[in-house]
Image (spheres, rainbow, N blue to C red):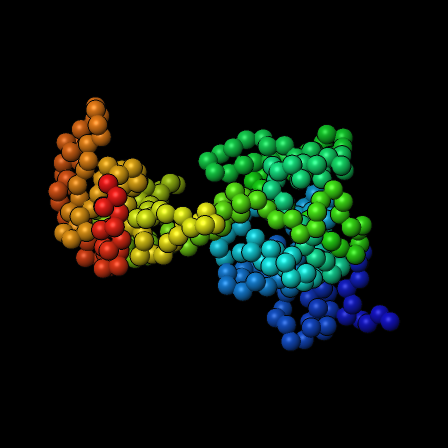
Amino acid sequence: MRFNYDLLPGERLTFEKISQRYGQKYPTEKALTFRGLLSPSTSPRQLVIRAVFAHQAENSPLEDLLFVSDDNDRKNYLRRFEHYMHQGQSFLYLRRNDPAVALWKVMGESRVYAMLDPGGATAQNLLASRGYRLTLMRQQGNDDYWQLYDPQAQPCFSEARTLQFIVVLETPALPTPAAVIAGQQVGRRVRVKVLQRAGQTEFSTAVQARYGGCVITGTSLSANVSASWVEACHIDASENEEGLLADNSVDNGLFLRSDLKRLFISGRLFIDAEQGTVHFRQAPQAEDQLQSFYQDIDGKACALWQYVPQSTRERLKKIVRHF
């Protein structure tokens, strides 16, 4: 028996109609949103997926694959998809290929079948088995830009795009995915890269809010420049067993001018944890003279030392012992 609130695979509906039917079927749940790939669009703490709204950015002609990019600590896509895969939980899956058409195709209640690295052999073999080819077009900074080509060698993406991972879905509208093992997860390198990037955003925001300017010089971060020249810096960059930073708290951070940050990371600049004074170490056989170039701050107290809490000073003490 079909009820008037059912969402049947193959139907094409407006978001308003989808939201209405979902609310009738699940009256105690919060309303759906389609601002991002997942609903709720952000879920930094809770691992919740009510629905997947695959916009053009995540789509390709392959309806059981999601090409995910721009994950961050607020969206929390990677952890949410992993959780639902491990638990075998389902969610409503909808797609829209044409942004000019306000209709979503209902794919039905679906599950995460596997999660793949874009450059991994499994993803490449899966796509090749369907006549497709995913090609790395360029690398820019820490980002990889990919293009997907169909069996006629035509590009599927409007332009090369960054990809963090691929989600393989099991949906009632399509056969069970082949050429991939159920439950496969993204590799350690990809997972660390995604989570590290997500955590860095939260860390940088917290450090900037605490200091507002370079701890050493007092230089503030201008909102009118395209590239930040005052940046958050980890004091202790040790990693845990998962390959993530062991301490990503604001107490493990300093806000430093870009050139001073690089000197701090390399060990050629250190801050006396007792007095808050700045000192430079000359590299062996170095031609440059750091002390003379930075003579205005060498041996001087940090301009914002009064804002550095005791917990951060203790971390500075430990780092100094490593040199």
**161 lies left or right of 300:** right
In what quadrant of the picture does the N terminus appear? Answer: bottom right
* 120 or 164, nearer to the observer: 120
Any part of residue 292 in sight: yes
Q: Residue furthest right?
A: 1
Residue for point 74% across, 61% down: 109
Q: Is residue 156 above or below residue 2?
A: above
Q: Percent from the top left, x then y, of residue 110?
A: 72, 58
User: Based on the displayed image, in which of its 4 quarters is residue 102 positioned?
Assistant: bottom right
Relative placement, left or right, of 196 versus 93 is: left
Give the quarter of the figure containing the C terminus.
Answer: top left
Which residue: 67% across, 62% down?
89
The x and y percentages for residue 68 are 60, 47
Query: Residue 78: image x %, image y %?
Result: 57, 53
Examine the rendered structure and indicate whether residue 321 appears above or below residue 259: below
Residue 95 x/y as whole percent:
71, 53
**Residue in front for this viewpoint, 202 or 284:** 284
Q: Is residue 40 above or below residue 272?
A: below
Any part of residue 102 in sight: no
